[in-house]
Image: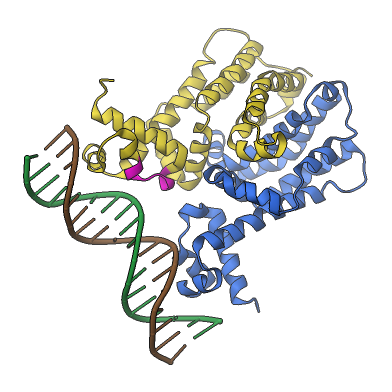
Chain colours: A yellow, B blue, C green, D brown
DNA sequence: GTCTATATGGCGATAGAC
DNA sequence: GTCTATCGCCATATAGAC
């Protein structure tokens, strides 16, 4: 609890921005969440835009770095794929609003994304390589590997970003039932992807 | 070109809201787009909230109705599935910002979604039934059909909502290359789903 | 019905005391 | 560094002339 004021502001801002986005968040709301006065946010971060970019940059980078970390171990391609799916769903479950946050903001202001890609050392091509190198099957050799990765990401991310709709429509708005469904998904997605790759 | 003033406002609002969302859109911007004065928007729709709900309701309903229409023909389950994938991608390509619009708004204000589901005659359970009835394979009989449908939707929707990121990262920000990729996806997704269902 | 002008409120940002 | 008070702007909304 001996966090500095700046850290308290940052963490409060992170929570609010991730929930409501740049346009939906209010500086007053962030100040309340941080338990202090609005003026202090400007003292430490000068502007809302600044504070937001700081949060977005970090959130975006950490999310990708964690994804990459799940891939660096020296195991077979198939094991890597299985580990990736488990870890990715776990990561989203621990940060369920982050995917929607990222997707909203890259659509709202793609420029931020462009500067961010050059500044940070993220190499998404590496993720694709790490994930699929060594997975040589009849299907894969014919197919653009980007289709596999994007299908996989879609299957994993969509149930989280469309949750309010899907939970209401297919689960009678039962939160717990939907949580169970999300846990089942690890095995289901593994099955689908492996079945396709090994066929 | 003999549309009424109300129609002009509605169509302008639709374009702006779908691009920028409820919070990002400005009444002045909508008035400019409609080629008239800001006060008229309030004369016809009373408030921004009202105008937005009108647009969202329609957009949401029409999107679902069109999806359902692709399923009503009397063909085999497998053909239905294939037709669904083709038509769904075509529908999104013709309305590329609609999925992100819907996803953003259901996360911003899930209440609107709830009232909407009761008012409109949308029966999403029917979509699931229509889509998968008659598809009985070893896999499917064991598996919650919701996993299939949500995987399918994720594979189809994700490339559109995450486009700015994916296009930059995997396609050197080449618009045309990404468009070609989206067209290829019809066959790829068909393959993946059928392979899984028939296995 | 359509416009100009204006009211009203909220939000980001700053000034200045302590 | 932290607070209170306030500025200035911009967005929604309304009043009122035509």
From the viewer's side, name the closer residue of C1 and A115: C1
What secondary structure is the stretch in magenta mostly built from? helix
Which percent across, then down, holds residue A95? 50, 27
Q: Which residue is drawn at the image coordinates 70% and 54% (left, top)?
A: B119
Q: Is residue A111 visible?
A: yes
Q: Which residue is drawn at the image coordinates 28% and 44% (left, top)?
A: A47
Q: Is residue B181 visible?
A: no
Does the magenta portion include A24? Answer: yes
Q: Quadrant of the N terminus of chain A?
A: top left
From the viewer's side, name the closer residue of A6 and B110: B110
Which percent across, then down, holds residue B162? 57, 39
Q: Magenta region: which residues?
A: A22-29
Which percent across, then down, holds residue A75? 59, 7
Task: Indicate whether A16 appears above or below B26.
Answer: above
Q: Which residue is drawn at the image coordinates 75% and 34% (left, top)?
A: B149
Q: Quadrant of the C terminus of chain A?
A: top right
Q: Quadrant of residue B55?
A: bottom right
Q: Which residue is drawn at the image coordinates 70% and 33% (left, top)?
A: A171
Which percent across, then down, holds residue B49? 52, 59
Question: Along the horizontal axis of the image, is A197 left or right of A3?
Answer: right
Question: Along the horizontal axis of the image, is A121 left or right of B51?
Answer: left
From the viewer's side, name the closer residue of B123 and A160: B123
Question: Along the horizontal axis of the image, is B179 left or right of A40?
Answer: right
């Amino acid at each position: 609890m001996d966090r500095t004021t700046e850290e308290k502001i940052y963490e409060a801002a992170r929570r609010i921005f991730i929930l409501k986005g740049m346009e939906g968040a209010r500086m007053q709301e962030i100040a309340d969440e941080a338990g202090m006065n609005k003026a202090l946010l400007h003292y430490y971060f000068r502007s809302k835009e600044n504070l937001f970019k700081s949060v977005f940059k970090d959130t975006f980078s950490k999310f990708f770095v964690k994804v990459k970390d799940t891939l660096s171990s020296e195991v077979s391609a198939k094991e890597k794929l299985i580990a990736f799916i488990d870890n990715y769903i776990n990561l989203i479950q621990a940060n369920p609003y982050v995917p929607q946050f990222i997707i909203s903001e890259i659509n709202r202001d793609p420029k931020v994304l462009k500067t961010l890609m050059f500044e940070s050392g993220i190499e998404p091509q590496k993720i694709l390589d790490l994930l699929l190198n060594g997975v040589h099957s009849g299907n894969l050799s014919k197919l653009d590997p980007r289709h596999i990765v994007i299908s996989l990401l879609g299957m994993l991310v969509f149930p989280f970003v469309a949750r309010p709709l899907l939970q209401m429509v297919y689960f009678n708005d039962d939160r717990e039932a939907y949580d169970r469904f999300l846990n089942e998904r690890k095995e289901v997605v593994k099955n689908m992807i492996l079945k396709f790759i090994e066929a």
